[in-house]
């Protein structure tokens, strides 16, 4: 009997540890990533010559990987841009999680009319006309400029956009001194309140769906309930505004809103403050490739 009890607690500890994990580097080719960085910022790849990936995923003025303004995705709908930071660690992409790998995400982001709105042919033509790009692709890829190689370069860049070494990463890697007592209490409350049931994994989100009645600005099915990917919480203090419609700008208000809506849990100001302090520990280093 004692063995069974001990086994139970060991399994519980294992399950808890497996719910979160520190950011670890992904394998990528640095030269291809630098080429992808140039393409990510290049407005010439869009039909209008004025849009780029970076326009909606800011990596210049403030490396949040998102935008302060919603993007228009149809006549009636706007959407809060998700951060591109750590997106290579996601299991699901786009708000409805319709894409399951980063390569397909990059392709759709280029050709979808509601995003860059370009085409394979146009992108290849624009890149081929640039002597610098043409030389780089010839050097890095045997077959030079192709759409697949353009996608691959951007994928390599996104794999470099990780934000490691957060206080939380150090804590779950074994440094029990790095978090303050309030931050530790916030993490315990985060678990106790059930936040971790949806916000888990390396990104503390972006790997499961949830159903929620949201603003009518977003598309919903016949039941009035929309299915969305649970957003990740890495660098959450820097990636506002929040929620898929960008309706919240204060992170503490978001904590209260989600606690009341999703968990049907009354939460007081002190608890909000503790969870807020914990969430600040998820801020990591800026990606080296942006320095």
Image (cartoon, rainbow, N blue to C red):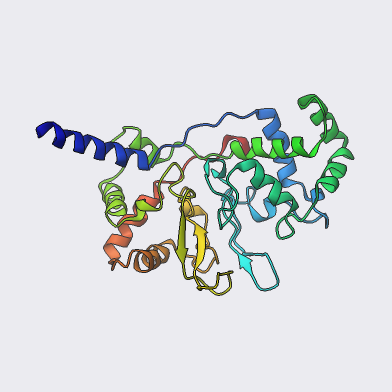
Which of the two residues, 67 or 121, is positioned nearer the viewer here?
A: 121
Residue 225 % position (x, y):
49, 69
Residue 26 % position (x, y):
55, 32
Left or right: 211 as drawn, with respect to 105:
left
View extreme (left): residue: 1
Q: Residue drawn 20% across and 38% down?
A: 8
* Quadrant the C terminus occupies: top right
Position of residue 257 relative to residue 27, above or below, is below
Left or right: 18 as drawn, with respect to 85:
left
Left or right: 61 as drawn, with respect to 151:
left
**For residue 133, which quarter of the picture?**
top right
Left or right: 10 as drawn, with respect to 222:
left
Which of the two residues, 245 or 269, is positioned nearer the viewer here?
A: 245
Q: Residue drawn 71% across and 45% down?
A: 40
Which of the two residues, 80 or 185, is positioned nearer the viewer here?
A: 80
Residue 264 % position (x, y):
32, 68
Position of residue 190 relative to residue 215, above or below, is above
Q: Residue drawn 81% across and 46% down?
A: 120
Which of the two residues, 157 or 2, is positioned nearer the viewer here?
A: 2
Q: Residue drawn 66% across and 44% down?
A: 104
**For residue 216, which quarter of the picture?**
bottom right
Residue 291 can be seen, yes or no? no
* Quadrant the N terminus occupies: top left
Residue 266 % position (x, y):
28, 68
Residue 121 can be seen, yes or no? yes
Position of residue 98 relative to residue 8, above or below, is below
């Amino acid at each position: 009997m004692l063995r069974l009890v001990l086994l139970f607690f060991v399994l519980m500890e294992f399950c808890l540890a497996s719910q979160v994990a520190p950011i670890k580097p992904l394998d990528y080719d640095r030269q291809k990533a630098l080429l992808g960085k140039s393409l990510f910022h290049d407005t010439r790849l869009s039909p209008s010559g004025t849009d780029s990936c970076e326009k909606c995923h800011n990596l210049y003025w403030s490396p949040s990987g998102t935008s302060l303004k919603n993007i228009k995705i149809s006549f009636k709908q706007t959407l809060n841009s998700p951060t591109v930071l750590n997106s290579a660690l996601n299991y699901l992409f786009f708000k409805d999680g319709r894409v399951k790998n980063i390569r397909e995400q990059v392709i759709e982001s280029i050709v979808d009319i509601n995003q860059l709105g370009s085409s394979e042919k146009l992108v290849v033509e624009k890149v081929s006309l640039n002597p610098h790009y043409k030389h780089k692709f010839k050097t890095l890829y045997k077959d030079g400029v192709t759409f697949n190689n353009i996608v691959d370069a951007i994928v390599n860049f996104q794999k470099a956009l990780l934000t490691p070494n957060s206080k939380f990463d150090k804590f779950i890697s074994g440094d029990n001194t790095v978090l303050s007592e309030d931050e530790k209490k916030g993490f315990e409350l985060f678990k106790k309140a059930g936040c971790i049931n949806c916000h888990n994994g390396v990104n503390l989100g972006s790997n499961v769906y949830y159903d929620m009645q949201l603003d009518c600005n977003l598309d919903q099915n016949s039941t009035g309930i929309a299915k969305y990917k649970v957003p990740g919480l890495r660098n959450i203090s820097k990636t506002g505004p929040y929620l898929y419609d960008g309706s919240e700008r204060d992170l503490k208000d978001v904590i209260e809103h989600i606690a009341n809506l999703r968990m049907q849990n009354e939460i007081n100001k002190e608890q909000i403050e503790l969870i807020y302090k914990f969430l600040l520990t998820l801020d990591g280093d800026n990606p080296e490739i942006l320095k």
